[in-house]
Amino acid sequence: MNTIPIIIDEKKLEVDPGKTILEVCRENEIEILTMCHLKGVLDIGACRLCLVEIEGINKLLSACTTKVAANMIIRTNTDRIKKYQRITTELFFAERNHVCAVCVANGKCELQDLGYKVGLDHIRYPHLFPQCEVDTSHPWYVMDHNRCIMCTRCVRVCNEVEGAHNWDVMNRGHQVRVISDFNSPWGESVTCTSCGKCLHACPTGAIWPKAIVQGQLQKNPGMINELVEKRKMKL
Amino acid sequence: MNRQDLKTIIYAEKKKEETNKYKHKICVCCGAGCISSGSEEVMKKLQEEIKTRGLENEVEVIPTGCMGPCNQGPLMKFLPEYNIYQKVDCSNISAIVQSQLIEKKPIEDLLLFADSREKPFIDARDDPYFKKQLKIALKNCGHINPERIEDYLVHNGYLALDKVLFEMSPEEVIAEVKQSRIRGRGGAGYPAGLKWETVYKYVNDQKYVICNGDEGDPGAFMDRSVLEGNPHRVLEGMAIAGYAIGANKGYAYIRGEYPLAIKRFELAIKQAKKLGLLGNNILGTTFSFDVEVRIGAGAFVCGEETALIASIEGKRGTPRPRPPFPAESGLWGKPTLINNVETFAAISPIINNGGEWYSEIGTPKSAGTKVFALAGKINYAGLIEVPMGTTLREIVFDIGGGIQNGEDFKAAQTGGPSGGCIPAEHLDVKMDYESLVSLGSIMGSGGLIIMDKSSDMVDVARFFMEFCMDESCGKCVPCRVGTRMMHDLLQKICENKATQIDLDRLEELAVYVKETSLCGLGGSAPNPLLSTLRHFRQEYENRIVQHD
Ligand SMILES: Cc1cc2nc3c(=O)[nH]c(=O)nc-3n(C[C@H](O)[C@H](O)[C@H](O)COP(=O)(O)O)c2cc1C
Ligand code: SF4
Ligand code: SF4
Ligand code: SF4
Ligand code: FES
Ligand code: FES
């Protein structure tokens, strides 16, 4: 296949056209922070952590949704980008109620990892402390909206991979919530197949199985893409 | 209907007009503003009056779209004299008819602006209010009955469509639009011709035209007035666009809060189809084009093109990252041209008079005219259309009649929740895309709110931030959480509880949200804040508590 030349962080690369900047970075071990991206489902560019600078384009573009083009000069780690990654992370933590010490995901959480990565020692914005529901109606799983960061990975996995479309989003702005069916308790869902894919897709302690103790959560988000790839193979 | 039939109808209608079946025509403004001040009652009363006097065969009474000075309504215009009466009260109608039609002289005290000018202008066209304006998009608004296609035909309606179908290739149409240098009127000001050309170049057997009539800016009613006052003009523009880019299907996305606009636009579609000006084989040619109305549910974000497209597709109306732009992958993944109502309304005059004619109006970089919805502390609030480059001072004082109660002008807010404020020292700014941006505001879609000293600029910023916070779709983090944080900080400043650190955080957040948000809603949400900080920083600082 023909390759195209691009430059990322001063590094000259020959890459396949048609790939996203994120894919190319991952293949070449250039770190891009992500949260809404999940390999195996469609990218939506929502968390804005993966923003990069591209010469000649005055806007920051999300690496997960932008395809490489010949002679692109991309920067992933400027001071401005680092500063914005930090603010985004702070906003994630301030938005809902994250008390890691008592969270099932403590130590196994992508948001927590992100906090360490951007060197978050404190949050400069007031916590919003919204009143969020904990839905324990499902026989096996719990949905804790206090820990949800609205990445919608669960929504996409359920729709695109499982084909059930149990999850969706309601309301606008900071009032948005992930809902089961038409906003009914998860346990009453007529679409949920209890497959558990959303649990593995979820980066935080928002969806977890009842049969675990705190800090013992095991998630395998990579499993989603493995599934997708296996399905593509001829039987 | 074929080409000859169209000409025959137009000819017959013109003849009717010329032979003056009626000696007088009375236009009663039935735009939204005048309806709310009671023009439908006036219309009814006037018709009764004409009947009791036995003048039905001499006088034609028609309802029209908005005439402009909405806060002086209900308005009533006598043609051919161009005498306009303001604040018409049902109890005055008999006297007005007596004086106008029988005694053949106007009642000066009741004419437009009679109570606010030393002397009203008998022929309203001499009034600086109208003299300083140039109506292209609004040309027939206030003159024709929007519910009759024949009224539009008499005013050369659908002649531009006829011209492109029989005399021009799609390339030539695009060249004409490019030459006009018209820029999209929905806010961003992207050159329309260039957009048409881009969509034209994508090869696909299915393409779409979308007319954006979502108009969610608080206080804006430009598109509404065009749709209500002259729906056929927009329809014709869409059909011409369809021919140019190779689309056979169009959607008009109109917000649900505009039931009259929806009704009139749907009626217009029906009438045009009946005459063969829309539908299959338009005017007997091989070109087919159909238009459907889609009703928006009142979310500001659904005016954003990718969210609007998602909404038409029946999905949740949230924006998606661009590229790909709708021109490449739009409605159902097909190449799609999306333009604003006012942009489409300018197309047929551009075709009829030539792109060069249009390009010479306005300024070199901002050609043509722009419709503004004048509101706030201004004497003559309503709908105006002026050449680009008209100064703010001319709009406020010559057209708008100055500030209410003789107060001083403090600032003008342009572009609504995505725009900014222009302070008094820049009253001579030319109203065009570049000049407004250089002052930290934007042209936007045409909202223009005039403020006097009673306006508190921090509160203005807080108001617009609250709007953006509520209207954020919630998809991306900077806008979803950032607008909430900025709103809370602004609230804190308004309550005199904020410190310098809060103000610094606010400024940092503003730049962050502007640069990182997914779509233009978040991308421009900080504008009112940033522009008031730029021009009225003192008002913020006065409220900062000094001790921590
Ligand atoms: C939050 C948001 C709201 C918008 N609302 C409208 C609207 O109500 N009407 C409109 O024509 N364009 C609106 N736009 C701009 C559209 O995305 C698009 O640029 C426009 O319809 C293109 O038409 P034009 O080139 O003729 O201006 C909005 C954009 C954003 C980001
Ligand atoms: S979801 Fe993650 S960040 Fe939130 S409380 Fe749990 S461990 Fe902490
Ligand atoms: S529940 Fe988990 S996966 Fe779903 S949106 Fe919330 S954080 Fe994302
Ligand atoms: S900027 Fe706001 S409105 Fe636009 S996608 Fe992000 S959250 Fe939605
Ligand atoms: S990972 Fe790209 S925007 Fe979230
Ligand atoms: S509605 Fe009558 S003048 Fe605007």
Image (spheres, coloured by chain):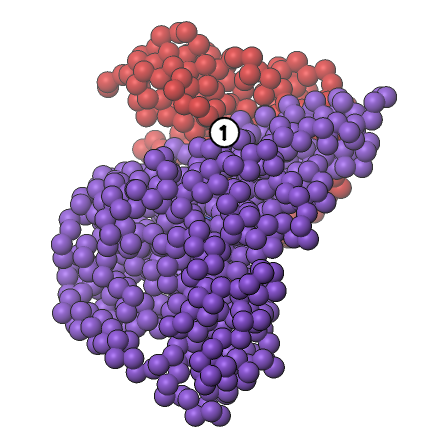
Residue B466, picture quadrant:
top right
Q: Position of residue A37 (x, y in %)?
A: 50, 28
Q: Is mark 1 within 8 Å of ligand 1?
A: no
Using the image as rendered, state which of residue A167 and residue A200 is in the foreground.
A167
Q: Is residue A47 above or below residue B176?
A: above
For badge 1, the amino acid type reads Ser
- Colour that chain B carries in the picture: purple
Relative to B310, residue B320 above or below: above
* Residue occupying image coordinates x 68% and y 20%: A107
The picture's colour for chain A is: red
SS category of the residue bearing label 1: helix
Q: Nearer the viewer, residue B205 or B538?
A: B538
Residue B525 visible within the image: no
From where the camera sits, is residue B54 visible? Answer: yes
Residue positioned 58% across, 60% down in the render:
B117
For the point 20% across and 63% down, which residue is it?
A: B282
Q: Which residue is mark 1?
A: B438
Q: Position of residue B195 (x, y in %)?
A: 31, 40
Q: Residues within 10 Å of mark 1 (few under 14, many from 20)?
A: few
